[in-house]
Amino acid sequence: MKTILITGAAGDVGTHLRRELASKYVLKASDLRSLTKINKEEKFVRADISKFSDALRITKGVDAVVHMGGYSVEGPWDGILQANIIGCYNVFEAARRNGVKRIVFPTSNHATGFYRRKDTIDHRVYPKPDGRYGVSKVFGEALGSLYADKYGMEVFCIRIGNVNPVPIDKRRLSIWLSPRDLAQLVTIGIEHPKIRFEIVYGVSRNKRSWYDNSNAYRLGYKPQDDSERYAKEVMAREKPGADPIAEMYQGGTFTVAEEVPNPAPLPKMKRKK
Ligand code: 15L
């Protein structure tokens, strides 16, 4: 069995993933926080990835890294800088020094959140991050590309939509990723023999998807779930009056999440008070 390091193991997505992958791999679960539950065949290693020595310690002796660790929503720059820029660099560089070739990097739909909902985008579009968090994910993708081209590492980037047992609102009907489809994508990222640098979208086979996910399908992804099954109940719960800018873009409220009002509202778009 391969030994896989999962950083950010205590987070929501990390917790789903550890449960789904438990029987397939020996998991080395790492986080700054404690795990609420440690599964069988799993070892917990506490680490702060913004410290290079910690990153070096946890990447030793593993077959692949699934780097979930970091800040997972929009937030203040310093937190994002430490966790998602410095932390991400540390994990890639530590993996390289320890001879770990394969990295699965869960990036985010927020790397391309400023594309409009009326657009269908594929893995080749120019990034359009919707905040500091989105920028940090574009940084991780760029770092992955560099480490693949320069050092021969094998990097699989998954632009994750929203991982949840069920889709939670209208926007998430388009970007939902069920835990078992997440596990399938991560497994492709770990196992596929011909990965150099790839970007795929981390979404289930949603009828309302904004993505052309043909690159994932080319690599063998066969999603089992479709959010449409939940659409009726989700739409019945949906409250009217959402911010029109957030509604226009794929990134939703991340596109308007700021401490100050959006400095450049679109012409003729009036923000609801
Ligand atoms: C993300 O990238 C976040 O990590 C997650 O918490 C969700 O907010 C998700 O995007 C989303 O767009 O719903």
Image (cartoon, rainbow, N blue to C red):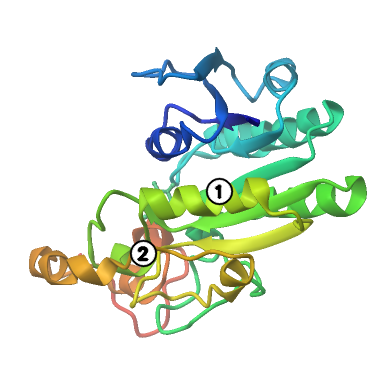
Q: Nearer the viewer, residue 7 or 249?
A: 7
| Of labels 2 and 1, the one closer to you | 1
SS for tag 1? helix
Q: Position of residue 212 (x, y in %)?
A: 52, 78
Disc 2 packing (10 Å; few <14; some 14–19; many ≥20) = many
Whether residue 261 is visible here, answered yes or no, is no
3 in relation to 116, above or below: above
Disc 1 packing (10 Å; few <14; some 14–19; many ≥20) = many
Residue at the spot x=40%, y=74% of the render? 209
Left or right of 164 in this view: 222: right
The extreme right residue here reads 150
Q: Nearer the viewer, residue 167 or 79?
A: 167
Left or right of 225 in this view: 101: right
Residue at the spot x=56%, y=60% of the render? 111
Residue at the spot x=31%, y=72% of the render? 247
Q: Amino acid at mark 2?
A: Gly
Q: Which mark is drawn over residue 252? A: 2
Residue at the spot x=55%, y=26% of the render? 27
Q: Nearer the viewer, residue 188 or 108?
A: 188
Whether residue 39 is visible here, answered yes or no, is yes
46 in relation to 12, above or below: above
Which circle's residue, 2 or 1, is located before the other in the chain?
1
Mark 2, ligand 1, within 8 Å: the answer is yes
Q: Which mark is drawn over residue 186? A: 1
Q: Position of residue 151 (x, y in %)?
A: 90, 45
